[in-house]
Image (cartoon, helix red, strand yellow):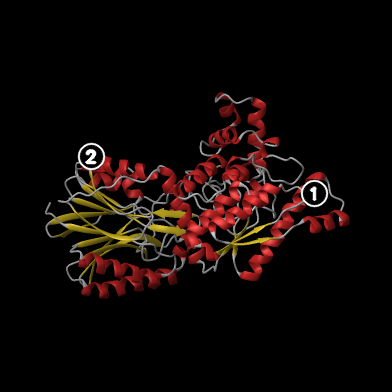
Amino acid sequence: MQNIRIAIGQINPTVGMVDSNRELIAQACLEAKNQGAELILFGELALSGYPIGDLALRRDFLEANEKGIQELVKDSTQWPELTIVLGYPRVADKTSGHDWAIAHNSAAVIQNGTLVGTYDKRHLPNYTIFDEWRNYVPGETGFSFEVSGTKFAVMICEDMWREEGPVEELKGNADVCLVLNGSPFEKGKNELRRAIAKRVAKQQQVSIVYANLVGGQDDLIFDGDSFVIDSDGSEIGQAKILEQETVVVDFADRHVAELPEQDSRTWDALVIGLRDYVEKNSIPGVVLGLSGGIDSAVCAALAVDALGPERVKGIAMPSIYSSESSLVDAEKLATNLGVEFEVVGISDIHAAYQQSINLTPLADENIQSRIRALILMADSNNSGRLLLSTGNKSEIAVGYSTIYGDSAGGYAPLKDVYKTEVYQLANYRNSRSEIIPQNSITKAPSAELRPDQTDQQSLPEYEVLDAMLAVLIEGHGSVADLVTSGYPDNLARDIAKKLKAAEWKRAQGAIGPRISHVSFGRGRRLPIANGYL
């Protein structure tokens, strides 16, 4: 293999914004050319954005992407010595027995005003969050080309993860494999990607250039962290994590930095997920309730890191059951963050409900939560701000929330973050700068909907609950699995029943960023009417 300078265009595309995505691609090509690169690789479906879901079934959308490719072919004459490899959806020549999908998930190879060829993704993932068998026709053949005496093969994401098919064809047929990726963030995923790439590189004696997307798209976060692996399995270069960047790697000059610690990655992923959800949907800002508790504090800190303090508003809504320290903690947090802060007491509104309606104790608690939701939604309507729901994965799992109350909102930053992880993230964020009041971290968690209420009157300690939920959710486990793990049978059944009973609430819940292997929403799909525990 000749020494060659290869660029990775790690961009943040927006689904459906073909023209603006093309501009990002063109800018990265210019940067690559100015740094002396001979080839630039972009991520999976970089032109259309990813994932496109059922937009892949719309012929007009596919034609818009084909037009975008033709424009890039014309643009490529500006960079005559730069080969461009990027992902886009294209109309399938034949449907291979599919009576639904009409598109390939493809890669285009462009050189100096010519579309040299295309490669169609051959392995279509159909697990966890992926639904690609529904949306695409699988490719059937490989594609290779040469640049400056170096032979390149092309793969798309899942093609590299399976040992059969495209991977088996690499050895002796390519010097470098270019892998276009739309690989979502997940705790521990950065290390796993490298392990897979290193295995393929060593087994097939081929270098791997792994280009990933970056940015938030609905509930998914793409973390970038593109990298290059040499044929001996050693890493020789990488792009930044969770940032747009055009990076050029010279195979003769190795520069590798260590990955940030996991809490840092998780925090920054949640920040970019929230930022891009707001920005890509043209939302002016966010509003959330500040209770003085840990969940709302972490959500507010995430919002400020994502959007800046001027686009975040917090509202404290004390009731007759709210402790004085809760309001103090909420106000201190708002001051530390520099956000707009308002106090709207709910005692009089609550009393009016009590006088007008016969309320059971549970209904009385829920009414308070729903009053707060009405106040927050009123602000959202008045200002156009997005209401953030502050619930965490532990509470959402067992239904420890009020439907149309504290679960109300358009985006839930902590939806895939267990309560124990919320504390970890609070301490991590404070290690950067002390913004979350220590009392919010150390006090017993409480909804403060009745006198002296604490979460642990209804739930086991969160360390215990979260460990049990990990067995049931991430492990797809059962009551028997919990008992085998050492939990009492009555507790195991109680938590499993709570998880099952809350399915209807989750079906109506706000979208939130995915950071685990099994997230609520598209990552975990169970029937609501279900007689099996």
Dot 2: within a 10 Å radius of its alpha carbon, few (fewer than 14), some, or many (20 or more) residues?
some
> Looking at the image, is mark 1 or mark 2 nearer the viewer?
1
- How many marks overall? 2
* Residue 326 falls left or right of residue 165: right
Q: Nearer the viewer, residue 178 or 253?
A: 253
Q: Describe the element under mark 1 as helix, strand or loop.
A: helix
Instruction: Please say whether residue 297 is visible from this viewpoint.
Output: yes
Q: Residues within 10 Å of mark 1 (few under 14, many from 20)?
A: some
- How far across and how far down the image is residue 471, in percent? 54, 34
User: Please, is residue 475 above or below residue 303 in the view?
Assistant: above
> Relative to residue 71, is residue 337 depicted above or below?
above
Q: Position of residue 17 (x, y in %)?
A: 42, 70
Upstream in sequence: badge 1 or badge 2 = 2
Residue type for callout 2: Gln
Say the numbered circle drawn on residue 418.
none
Task: Tell which of 525 and 249 is nearer to you.
Answer: 249
Gap between marks 1 and 2 measured at Cα: 64 Å
Identity of the residue drawn at 77% across and 53% down: 367
Task: Give the image quarter of residue 502.
Answer: top right
Quadrant assignment, res 349: bottom right
Where residue 57 appears, as percent x and y from the top left, is: 46, 64
Vertical order, 33 against 414 (above or below) = below
Q: Which residue is mark 2?
A: 203
Please name the residue shown 67% across and 63% down the image: 377
Quick check: 48 above or below 397? below
Residue 182 lies, in percent from the top left, at 38, 55
Task: Give the SS element for disc 2.
Answer: helix
Residue receiving disc 1: 364
Give the quadrant of the C terminus.
top right
